Amino acid sequence: MMRILTASTENIDDPAAAIDEIKAQLDLEHRLLKNSVGIVACHYEFVISGTATAISESLPFDIAGTNSSLQAVNNAKGTLLFTLLVFTSDDVSFKTALTPSLREGVLEKKIVDTYREAASAREEKPVLIFTFAPFMLENSGDDYVRILSEASGNVPCFGTLAVDDTPDFRECYMLFNGGHYKDKMSLILVYGNISPKFYLATLSEDKLLDRAALVTSSEGHILKEVNGRPVVEYFEDMGLTKASETSYAMASLPFMLDYGDGTPPVSKVFIGLNAQKHAICAGAMPEGSTMYLGVFDKDDVLLTSGKLIKKVLQETPSPMAIIGYSCISRSMTLGSDLFAEIDLVLGEITKNTPFFFAYSGGEMCPTRINPKAAINRFHNNTFILCVF
């Protein structure tokens, strides 16, 4: 048996009131089972005020998550909001873990060692790894996903990078058990007889431009050459020279990246140019992959999100819970209509379906599951769902 609970509060500057409100909604005395864990999303003001820490420390289970620019649960949505989803079960169990700082040293060793230590107490593999990380230009989310996939034997990974609503994303924290970090990753390993399903939406096929380009030189998330020419010349050919010189100006022009291995293309975002005039992207750009520039707008965000939630409910008419993350770039296309994507989803699901949603600085979600393994990918411009 598993219960999934949600709660929220707008009490940023009154920790005691926030704790009372969260506990009243969760009703833990009557609803908590043997094993529990929480997933959090909140505005960074909850971190700065100390209220996020106070709430986490008041609860009798581990909590992991990120801050976000906007979040929602069934009965609440907002920017200045703290949201919490709790898994509690007698036969599904959880193990949490926190990496050391990911700024210095060997990234792979730190993540692998953290995962292996957390997983060492169990003979079986987890059925799911929830993954939460800060937004760091030093590292690529693709590296996180690749390393975890290799370490775990391709266990499905689902999660997010932190994001905020500051102009330069300076307040992006990963949250773990009352602490907040700009340089650490947290994991929730899930064990038991559950079978989560994964869904994602990017942009419609008719939004892709006709001019494919081959990645001929790159280093991780740094794109150097396209079609054998400097990447800045590619931007010139596309009429994007001015936009490329402004950080995040091309967030609404995603690259769909085809790895050429039979897996579905994934979306990546161009962030800006470095001193060498190479493109800094929000995900790895492997040499030999083919990229297609797309055009993103509000109508397509709502169209693709609407199709996705309808597909979910067709396949699982009465889900136990739905967890969703949507890229901050999708939010940017909505302009002043901040809640349009959330309202669309909330309008489709029933009030009895526990729902948790937050905007993301990068999305981790499998693109394919087979009986032996998941193909995990890191995405941008994408709406991802984990359905129980």
Image (cartoon, grey):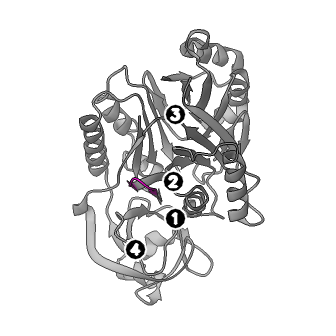
Q: Is residue 254 above or below residue 96?
A: below
Callout 1 secondary element: loop
Q: From the viewer's perspective, tell me whether residue 19 is left or right of residue 214.
A: right
Q: Magenta stretch containing residue 372, yes or no? A: yes
- Judge whether 241 appears above or below 110 on screen: below
Image point 34% across, 69% down: which residue? 262
Q: Observer-nearest residue: 267 or 234? A: 267
Comparing labels 3 and 2, the label whose residue is closer to the camera: 2
Circle 3 is placed at which residue position? 79
| Tag 2–tag 4 contact (CB < 8 Å) | no
At x 51%, y 57%, the residue is 154
Q: Amino acid at mark 1?
A: Gly
Earlier-in-chain disc, 2 versus 4 = 4
- The residue wearing badge 4 is 240
Identify the residue under disc 2: 362
Closest to the observer, 227 or 148: 148
Q: Quadrant of the C terminus?
A: top left
